[in-house]
Image (tube, helix red, strand yellow):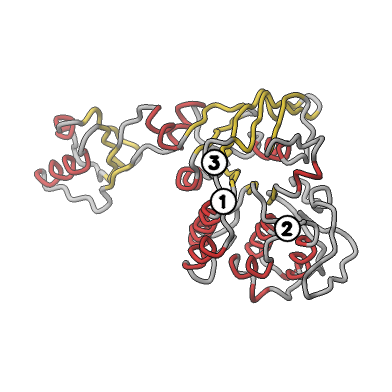
Amino acid sequence: MADGRLFSSWVPMRRTSSHGRTSSIRTIGASAGLPRRESLATAMAQSAPRRTLTVMDNVIEVSGLRKTYGSLVAVQDVSFSVRRGEIFGVLGPNGAGKTTTVESIAGLRRPNAGAIRVLGLDPERDGRQLRQRLGVQLQQATLPDRLKVWEALELFASFYQAPADWRRLVEEWDLTEKENASFASLSGGQRQRLFIALALVGDPEVVILDELTSGLDPQARRATWELVRAVRDAGTTVVLVTHFMDEAERLCDRLAIIDEGRIVASGSPRDLIDGIGVEPRVRFTANGSDLGFLEAVAGVSRVMREGGDAVVHGRGPILARVASALAEHDIHPLDLRAVHPSLEDVFLALTGKQLRD
């Protein structure tokens, strides 16, 4: 959670542990980085038990959600549904209301208005049942400093009636070498991977991952994306909360874009991008060259300058045509590249502003 408190409000009631080790922990603790090898994602998808999926079956339904904190309206009239077996993104800038929305879905916040159903359950009324079927990795969370990785996983597994094998999660999320390490000794990326493993240890039907890759380097982010796809492919519905446009575009089957507490658009990334009608562009360093001749190239609609770069807008095989025209004028930019419309363009078109961190 945003205040970094322990997850004691989330975990289900404890059951008698069936694992070999006996944990000495008496109190409940809290509710990614790069796997050792890329094949882990494949192995994960193959080894995990698969669920029978009905793709069009909605596992989450949110209608008219409103949440205020005093005079601050954090979420206003938010409505969307999540289908079984998909990766659904909740995308928007920091402070847009994303975390408040998913914490309401998880039963960790009480909305002022609206209706929520998760797997047919009311998060407020049916919280105990829901926690057996829903996993949550929150944006900020913590554990007792001396709690070891294996202790946390075994403890959390003991709260579920039919948990996943936490030892398999240790391997999948690259925590084997840290299995006996204390929470306080873990790096930021290792802590993130541990919280993801804790969210999955109950073998949930739905898992919420809030700002999954914040603080991870680019290579670690992409490796984590592969594992998230493997989680989805094994039958778990994923709700991915992120402010990274590229992450949402590459991972999500569908998404809702939230800004200032409201949904401004929803749909598949491709449909949202196609819907704004932004032309493809070609960009390169201009170095002061006269580029007026590019306006006569077939398919080109306009030629602009942005700082030291030239940006050519148009339709069709515009990259090939611009490259040919430049070569005819003995101009050979080394950074000539196509720039395709993205979710960043969607957000700009809908809100009139760039996505802010």
- Report which quarter residue 109 is drawn in: top right
Give coordinates of residue 248: x percent, y percent: 50, 44
Between discs 3 and 2, the one toward the N terminus: 3
Within-10-Å neighbours for mark 3: few <14, some 14–19, many 20+: few
Q: Nearer the viewer, mark 1 or mark 3?
A: 3
Q: Distance from label 2 to label 1 (Cα)?
A: 16 Å
Type of residue at label 1? Gly
Type of residue at label 3? Thr
48 to 179, vertically: above or below:
above
Q: Distance from label 1 to label 3 (Cα)?
A: 10 Å
* Residue under label 2: 162
Q: Is residue 178 left or right of residue 296?
A: right
- Are the two marked residues, 3 and 2, in contact with CB atoms closer than 8 angstroms? no
* Residue under label 1: 235
Q: Distance from label 3 to label 2 (Cα)?
A: 22 Å
Type of residue at label 2? Ala
